[in-house]
Image (cartoon, rainbow, N blue to C red):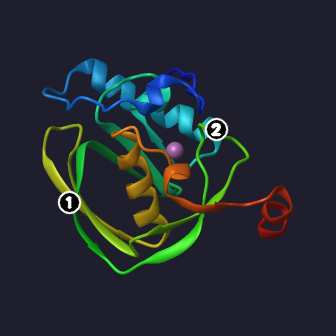
Amino acid sequence: MAKLTIVKEGDDTLRKVCRPVTEITPKIERLLDDMLQTMHEAEGVGLAAPQVGILRRIAIVETEPGTVYELINPEIIFTEGEQIGSEGCLSSPGDYGIVTRPMTVTVRAMNRKGETVCYTGSELLARAFCHEIDHLDGVLFKDKASRMLPAEEIRRRK
Ligand code: CO
C-alpha cells in the first residue's frame, strides 16, 4: 500500500464530475487499498477518489474503526429524516461547518468483487455517505454549510 497525496480545496480536481468505473481492475483494487491507508494516516472517516486526484466514482467510509465501506459507483437510493451537525473534510483541514443531511440513507454501490451491495446508515455514517458521494459530483461540504464554525467554537466542541 502507498500513501497518496490529498488534494486541497482550491484545486480544480475537487470540482469535477467523476466518471463511473466500468470494470474492477487490479489498479482499482490497489487504489482502494491506498485510499484506506491515506485516510487512516490523515485520521479521516471518509475519502473520495477525486481527493487523491483520481476522477472516478469511488469512495471509502469508515466511521467505526474496522468497518470499511468501499463504494464504487455509489448512488443514494433512499433517505429519511434530517440531522443538523458539524462537518469537516480532509481537503479543508481545520475547517468545520454546519450541514443539514438526512438522518438515514441507503446507498447502492458496487464492491471490489463487482457485486451490487446496499448499505443503510444513520447519523455519522449517513453524513459520511452523503459527504463522500457529493465529492464525486464536485460538491464540497462548504457549498451546503448553513454557516462555518469560528475557531473558538471548534475548540469548544472538541
Ligand atoms: Co470531504
Q: Where 115 sits versus 101, above or below?
A: above
Please tell me how crowded label 1 is: few (under 14), some (14-19), or many (20+) other residues with Cα within 10 Å.
some
Image position of 108 (left or right of 63): left
Which residue shows up at 41% across the image and 47% down it? Answer: 132
Please tell me how crowded label 2 is: few (under 14), some (14-19), or many (20+) other residues with Cα within 10 Å.
some
Mark sitting earlier along the chain (1/2): 2
SS state under label 2: helix
Query: Do the CB atoms of the residues marked 1 and 2 lie less than 8 Å apart?
Result: no
Q: Quadrant of residue 21?
A: top left
Q: Quadrant of residue 135?
A: top left
Label 1, label 2: how far apart the Cα atoms are: 27 Å
Q: Nearer the viewer, residue 44 or 103?
A: 103
SS state under label 1: strand
Question: Disc 1 marks which residue?
Answer: 118
Which residue shows up at 70% across the image and 49% down it? Answer: 95
Which residue shows up at 53% across the image and 33% down it? Answer: 37
Q: Which mark is residue 44?
A: none
Question: Disc 2 marks which residue?
Answer: 42
Q: Where 105 sits versus 68, above or below?
A: below
Which residue shows up at 20% across the image and 32% down it? Answer: 20
